[in-house]
Image (tube, rainbow, N blue to C red):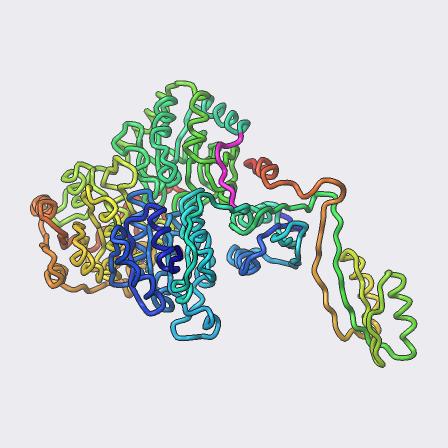
Amino acid sequence: MATTKHTIVALVEDKPGVLNRVASLFRRRGFNIESIAVGHSEVAHLSRMTIIVNGTTATVEQVRKQLDKLIDVVRVSDITGENITVRELALIKVKAGSATRSEIIEIADIFRGNIVDVASDSLTVEITGDEDKIESMLKLLRGFGIKEIARTGRVAMVRGAIGAPAPEEKVARSHTKK
Amino acid sequence: MKKTGAQIIMESLIQEGVEVMFGFPGGYILPFYDTLPQYPQLRHILVRHEQGAAHAADGYARATGKVGVCVATSGPGATNLVTGIANAYMDSVPVVAFTGQATRAFIGKDAFQEIDISGITLPITKHSYVAMDTATLARTVKEAFYIARTGRPGPVLIDLPRDVQLDQAEFSYPDRVNLPGYKIPTKGHPTQLKNAAKLINEAQQPLIIAGRGVVISGAFEELKQLAETAQIPVITTLLGIGCFPENHVLSYGMAGMHGSGYANKALDNTDLLIAIGMRFDDRVTGKISAFAPHAKIVHIDLDPAEIGKNVPVHVPIVGDVKAVLQAMQKMIESTQHIDWIKRLEGWRKQHPMTEIRDHSGLLPQYIIRQLYEATGGEAVVVTGVGQHQMWTAQHYLFHEPHTFISSGGLGTMGFGLPAAMGAKVGRPDKTVWCVDGDGSIQMTIQELATLVQDKIAVKIAVINNGYLGMVRQWQELFYERRYIATPISCPDFVRIAEAYCIAGRRVTQREEVRPAIEQAMAHDGPFLIDFKVEPEENVFPMVPPGAAVGEFIEFPKKEVSTWPRRSTP
Ligand SMILES: Cc1ncc(C[n+]2csc(CCOP(=O)(O)OP(=O)(O)O)c2C)c(N)n1
């Protein structure tokens, strides 16, 4: 079966050890986390995790169900098929001399990135966007020599008025045989 | 009035209806122990090794359906619990484990006997707490018991820093829990119930396979009603044994690796498999691609993550087994499956399980049969892990739930004696037999002392074959009889018992079996029988690893030795 990237959103209680529980579950069940981003949500005491996993639909459905069983996980949904907004932030420190500095700034401009730090031999570019956008920009910057990259991993949200579907709605869409 | 953390725990335990706990003290759990005498209604049973405490709590929980409680100190006390906690986790047994912990300021500093037990047990607990605040202790205990007992049960650990046990706080026991992330499915989806009922009403060769979920949910009457109304034969998993009376005409015993030939034949031929409260473990499915090849599958389970995990199903029903079966009752038509039952009866004759061959030596199967007859199938029987466990499952007919207690998921040697101890403490009205292997019992034999100190009248039958029999069987069948590290010596068990002040006797002849069993049961107090059995007896039928359940092999051994070598246990 084909593996694809899935975007899983989990609302979790803001308690010590929660990240550990989630990570432990992924390791224990042999699921691979591609990226995980954690921060506060709109609800006090609840954090929001955006987890990117690679797997078949069946595996990812197992991930979702197993996550849902953790007591500290309030809600989980696989929003891959939904109409979603996806963003990632990257900080890229590029080698820059007097000859190349303006060219790099131009590239940053095209991608609507910001120059957030300037040193005698480098520039740091901040860029936000989906993965493709960040990859395209990186491709262009590689030629100048990259000194350091820091990426947040994806965060995602379903577009429009409707939030992530409640877990019960998903349960009903279970498997059929053969 | 303010109470200490330790007092708050005791008060909370009483609120939860706890009567007994199994434990072993040490420095960081001392405040807990020091408080015990203030609460004489809480009985503490001192075990000889913390693994024994966890297994005893597990056995107690399985025998009573209540939550079992065990206690250990920090560090080595806590790590000694690990096997027992894992065992309870694999078999969905409600246990709450308390561990002592270093004073809060020492946590994370590698202080003496300071170990991250909540981290160590993370993948083998349903949930865990490090209690960092005396003021929230009552709520923590409340939640722990609630989580352990409800939904799919499991072990919950509470780690108790020493100073949290000593600090004071107001005590008031919450009457509700607030766990927004904890969902317990209940009734099952109405459409799926209808779909299932339709399949059941239309099936020509339906089969029920029932697991421990039926025991947990207490759905015995509902299961019986479904089976009888639609005349559906019932087979069980190892842990499902007892959830349907094995002396019922519709009972076809246990399926799987050492299941009856007729149960496995039924799996191979059924056109509708109704799987209730079971999880398609590889020991019951055999080769998964060849499992129930002609069947549509209805799967009823409380845990949504079990649906479709190992086997794809046609009709998934997520809900409490009892509630689901009740909701389905009105939709099930009363029918007969005369031809199908006839075929099953044919297989029963062709592959009999109950017959024990004529043999001059002492056969373990014969002992189990005698045990069944002597107890009238009324005893609670707890086993170790190995051949004796399978013979017990095969040759003792269990009439009631909670009477067959065995380590299924983890397959923990050493479970038998301490679990039997816990079972007897929970069910003093019942005769409790521990059927153990000479290997298994040596792993936790120290609990004989606990039986004596706390006057726990467990009857012990050691099926002594001089081997780690189950592994030897695999070596015989799949490793050309290279018996490496499986011949095992043992002490004179009767003299060991005597040294612990336990009565005992050795049995080497067939004729002595029944009188010895009767003597053990008439004896006031624990009793040990050392049965010297045929050393190289094998458990049959057997589905070789990697084979389909229909491809089971049977006695005699000749047929068997030609089977190709396969993987290790
Ligand atoms: C703690 C543990 N270690 C090893 C095993 C692997 N194992 C499974 S059955 C078995 C042999 C058990 O021997 P015994 O208790 O004498 O019972 P028998 O099979 O002879 O009836 C072993 C070693 C296990 N299940 N548990």
In x, y percent, where is residue B428?
20, 45
**Residue lying farthest to the front in this orientation:** B1
In x, y percent, where is residue A98?
91, 79
Residue B386 seen anywhere in this rendered image of the structure: no
Prevailing secondary structure of the magenta residues: loop
Residue B555 appears in which quarter of the rendering? top left
Residue A169 appears in which quarter of the rendering? top right
Q: Name the residue rendered at 48%, 45% in the picture.
A: B177
Q: Is residue B11 left or right of residue B355?
A: right
**Is residue B188 inside the magenta stretch?**
yes
Q: Is residue A65 left or right of residue B427?
A: right
Q: Name the residue rendered at 50%, 40% in the picture.
A: B307
**Is residue A14 inside the magenta stretch?**
no
Q: Is residue A175 left or right of residue B249?
A: right
Q: Name the residue rendered at 40%, 39% in the picture.
A: B213
Image position of B60 with respect to B490: above or below: above
Judging depth in this view, the residue of A154 and B476 nearest the camera is: A154
In x, y percent, where is residue B212?
37, 41
- How many numbered marks appear? 0
Residue stretch rendered in magenta on the structure: B182-189
Quarter occupied by the N terminus of chain B: bottom left
Quarter occupied by the C terminus of chain B: bottom left
Judging depth in this view, the residue of A124 and B537 nearest the camera is: A124
Image position of B225 with respect to A55: above or below: above
